Image: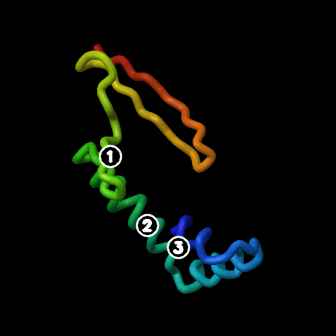
Amino acid sequence: MRQFNLEQTEDRWGREILFVILYVIPVYPFAGFADIVLFNSIEFWTGKNPINDKPSVTPISDNRTFERTARSTSKRSASMGIATS
């Protein structure tokens, strides 16, 4: 939804008007609900992101260590390593 909104106009006021319209119609609330309940549940149980088909948790060096990477639109990323016993 965010990408759709950003691609429609370069004007920030136009984006805000589009955001309000999509919120009043309830496009944003339905998309948020689907993301929270449906897509996150699918990702949790399958281990794959249903939106871009990438694994949500990837092994690093052995079967007991995993890494989760979060990326922002500004190409910065943050990683967190988790070691299990």
Q: How many marks on residues?
A: 3
Residue shown at the point (30%, 46%) measured from the top left:
44
49 vs 80, left or right, is left
Q: Which residue is mark 3?
A: 28
Instruction: Give how far across and how far down residue 16 sits, in percent.
Output: 71, 75
Please tell me whether mark 3 sits on a helix, a strand or a loop.
helix
Q: Quadrant of the C terminus?
A: top left
Residue shown at the point (77%, 76%) measured from the top left:
13
Closer to the camera: disc 2 or disc 3?
3
Q: Which residue is mark 1?
A: 54
Closer to the camera: disc 3 or disc 1?
1
Q: Amino acid at mark 1?
A: Lys
Q: CA distance from mark 3 to mark 1?
A: 24 Å
Instruction: Give how far across and how far down residue 32 sits, in percent.
Output: 47, 66
> Which residue is at the front of the view, 80 or 34?
80
> Which residue is at the front of the view, 29 or 1?
1
* The image quarter in which residue 56 lies: top left
Q: CA distance from mark 2 to mark 3?
A: 8 Å
* Crowd tier of the residue under label 2, counting other residues whose Cα lies within 10 Å: few below 14, some 14–19, many 20 or above: few
Closer to the camera: disc 2 or disc 1?
1
Up-down relation of residue 2 to residue 74 (above or below): below
Q: Which residue is mark 2?
A: 33
Up-down relation of residue 69 to residue 63 (above or below): below
Q: Amino acid at mark 3?
A: Tyr
| Mark 2 / mark 3, whichever is N-terminal | 3
